[in-house]
Amino acid sequence: MRKTLLVNRRSALKLVAAGTAMLSSPYIIRPRPAWAENGVLNVTTYDKFLPQDFLDKFQKDTGIEVRVRLTDDQGKQYNLLTAEGANPSTDIVTVAGHRYSQFIQSKLISAIDIDKISNWKNLNSVYQDAKWARVEDKLWGLPILAGYEGLARNTDYVKEADSLEIMFDPEYKGQTSYIVSDFLTLAMQYLGYDGDFVSYTDNRELAQKATNDARDLLIKHKDMVRKYYDAGSEVQQMFINEDIYLAHSWSGPVAKLIMEGHPIQLSAPKEGTFGFVYTLNIVNNAPNQENAYKLLNAVLADPAVGASMTRQSGYSSTINGVADLLNDREKMAATLPQNQLERVIFFSSVNRDMKNELVDRATAEVKAA
């Protein structure tokens, strides 16, 4: 997971932004410096997530040698930790919040002790004790980067987009586009239902009704849509060609357009939208746990670290003060106003099978209508 892709709900872990590329790689082993006398720290993460200048400073300040192994897939991290069992070769992994349950149930990661992270207060309040991050009444990771979906618009033609209602406005007939499976869950939010299915665990009948109502809404307004798309490159090209003025999109492809100077903006609708968060997680039985806490604390010590993460990855930072360090175009590409950020519902790991089944069926029915 960094070609520019559009993430749908089944591939949310491959969200791209700003044209970077994430490639799987073996350990990046750097020569052990003479001053590294206080141990090592092994980190598995994605390309561009931890800035090299930050790692260099951390190593210099602490004497801890950081060994980075790159990954491009959550499943690969899970399989590696499972295979290593009680003797892991890594101390920190990078897990998306809606994958927590899988790692926690397999006892692969440890709950974090925020008392050991003195800079926790520098984390944006939206993430400090978020519901998605708390499992078994414990917190399981340090949120570092977030991606979200919303309403993308060409600001030359669409001045405001604060509600999903605009996607059904006849004024934009034939000038809208979306990923059916993802927009269907937002349509559920628009209709007052739970688009993430968390509240439907024991109520399949209501889940089916909610899905059917959203499906029928999209079929009713099918003439609004110029094209259903699947890849981020498709929606980018439609915006560039001015084939569309309005779309549902994930933040990655839109960030790239904004950084290239196109008159595009993304907003979180008032009915709520969805997002996911990458977190740094301490591995269960991590051999260098104390060093891991030192790195988590250092990530939060300076908003410049978060700004660098955002510039490199295209994702939104979770750290307070980052927006103040970005230029206007960077802010438009990678940040949301606080009131809109509070509208983002971060994907839960609860009830995924039911959600996948009902949404996949409804998606096929919308496309076939």
Image (cartoon, rainbow, N blue to C red):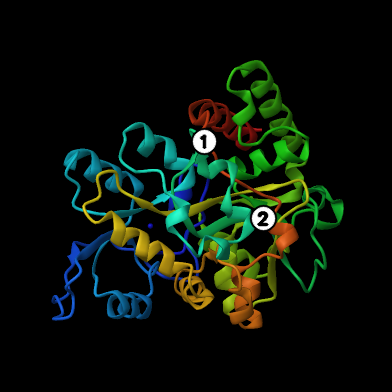
Decide which of tag 2 and tag 1 comes sooner along the chain: 1
Q: Which residue was labeled with disc 2?
A: 150
Give the percent coordinates (x, y) of residue 4. Answer: 46, 64
Q: Is residue 16 left or right of residue 284?
A: right
Q: Is mark 2 on a helix, strand or loop?
A: strand
Q: In which quarter of the image is residue 216?
A: top right
- Residue 77 vs residue 230, the one in the foreground: 77
> Which label sits in the foreground, 2 or 1?
1
- Residue 52 vs residue 369, the one in the foreground: 52
Image quarter hosting the N terminus: bottom left
Give the percent coordinates (x, y) of residue 335. Answer: 63, 68
- Give the answer, above or below, for where 224 lies relative to 313: above
Q: Which residue was labeled with disc 1?
A: 137
Q: Residue at x 36, y 64 (%)?
A: 294
- Residue 144 vs residue 197, the one in the foreground: 144
Q: Which residue is drawn at 59% across and 46% down?
A: 130
Q: Residue at x 86, y 56 (%)?
A: 171
Q: Residue at x 78, y 35 (%)?
A: 191
Q: In this view, does 210 lie to the left or right of 79?
A: right
Q: In this view, does 279 lie to the left or right of 147?
A: left
- Give the answer, above or below, for where 75 lies relative to 128: above
